[in-house]
Amino acid sequence: MRLFIFFLFSITFIKAQPNVVFFLVDDLGYMDIGAYNDTTFYETPNIDKLAKTGVKFTNGYAANPVCSPTRYSIMTGKYPSRVDATNWFSGTRSGKFKSAPLHSNMPLKEVTLAEALKEGGYKTAFLGKWHLGPTPEFWPENQGFDINIGGHNRGSPPGGYFSPYKNPRLENLKDGEYLTDRLAGEAIKIIDKFHSKEEPFLVYLSFYNVHTPLQAPRKLVEKYKVKAKSITGKEFGSEEQVWPGAKERKVRILQKHPTYAAMVEKMDDAVGKVLSRLNELGIEEETIICFTSDNGGLSTSEGSPTSNLPLRGGKGWIYEGGIREPFIIKYPSMFKPSISDVPVISTDFYPTILDLAGVEAKPNQHLDGTSLVPLLKSPQGKIKRDYIFWHYPHYSNQGGFPGGAIRSGNYKLIERYEDGRTHLFDLNKDPGESNDIANLNKDLVNSMSKKLHSWYKKVDAKFLQPKGENLNPWRP
């Protein structure tokens, strides 16, 4: 009898599988969030609170400076170079040379994060921007998601942010509703549904905000027009101010765009609504919450709505402004709030979530990700990785050059693919990458270059192709 009572007592205290809510924001810059920039023009109280109550990574990175490749890295735990998914689907702009070959879908053979969690007993739902395959066979419902609301292959919201949208995965539209509000409302309905059936769940809310077109409710835009009046100074500079010696391109150097600010606030409101619902249901403590962006803020084209300064570059550039992201993980019942300055990257979400969920790891799938649990447990934690890499063999729509990069400790080496030139920066002393120290550290440049070239071979990286009279693009 005593043994039976002990057995029942033990079952009562078996820890249930945690839920997972993943927020992915499109084109959100590192400096757009108050938790990362206390002088930002934008208002993000809900995300700021999430960062304060979770683990905030100050050196969190996207695997690529544009959207589709980073989305691929989160879903697969792999560097996108492994399948030549190295640009937005299907971006093949050429420059002096043709871009590298581009594979414009996430192969169905990949075991996605959603599929791995489904194997572990989870229900799964995707909402918002997908951009990982051109036809329905590659859409979320065929990549491990039980529910797909809004997910298809368009990069920007078809028809804009106000209903009626031209979206094959959104129904029963209310005229004039705002897309971000709609997605948050749908996410809450799904959370309620899964919770009522006591099923562990993954809800992956992938906002279209703050991607162009720049559209937001008029009243909120007016609020920021008033706020912008108090901010003086030059809004734009030439590229030479940020990228010495490059062809001139205008770059925003001051945050004050009212419509963009309103879009940021609407996104933050949506995050807050979802988090509030978790709290109301009493399940926030047992929910893993992740928050990040797919690339840096848009600062050099398409209206240039935000500034990433003091970070250099923005979306489409392999400088810090294009790849360093807000990166937050919260699991209240397991980890205390902390700040980690260890470099981490979007491939790490997959193995980290499996680890926290008690789902068997898939090391042959998430080849390039590392579980961040040691860092979540303690700011002094260690992970087994010395380098992280980037490979962007394309001419970006935003003016970024084809190149690769490697980060080791505080040092970051950038390699240009047109001619093989290299640049070295000490990010601890120079986060704006304005002081190239390559000539003063030739041994370090050589060793980091060798590591980068070895990685190219490991992932079978592709490079620029001949074009016209330009027959000899650089090769590592």
Image (tube, helix red, strand yellow):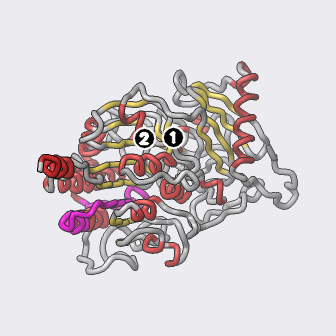
Q: Quadrant of the C terminus?
A: top right
Vertical placement of 446 versus 402: above or below?
above
Measure how far apart labels 1 and 2 are at the Cα level. 7 Å
Residue at 67% in and 63% down: 102
| Residue 162: x %, y % from top left | 31, 70
Q: Which mark is residue 321?
A: 1
Membership of 395 in magenta stretch? no
Can you tell which quarter of the image residue 24 is in? bottom left
**How many neighbours does mark 1 have within 10 angstroms: few (below 14), some (14-19), or many (20 or more)?**
many
Q: Nearer the viewer, residue 86 or 148?
A: 148
* Contact? badges 1 and 2 (CB < 8 Å): yes
Q: Residue 210: which numbered mark, if any?
A: none
**Residue that numbered label 2 is attached to:** 30
Name which residue lies at 82% across and 50% down: 473
Between residue 165 and residue 170, name the one nearer to us: 170
Q: Visible in this render: residue 336?
A: yes
User: Magenta part of the protein: which range?
Assistant: 189-218
Taking the spot 29% from the left edge, 55% from the top edge, the residue there is 19
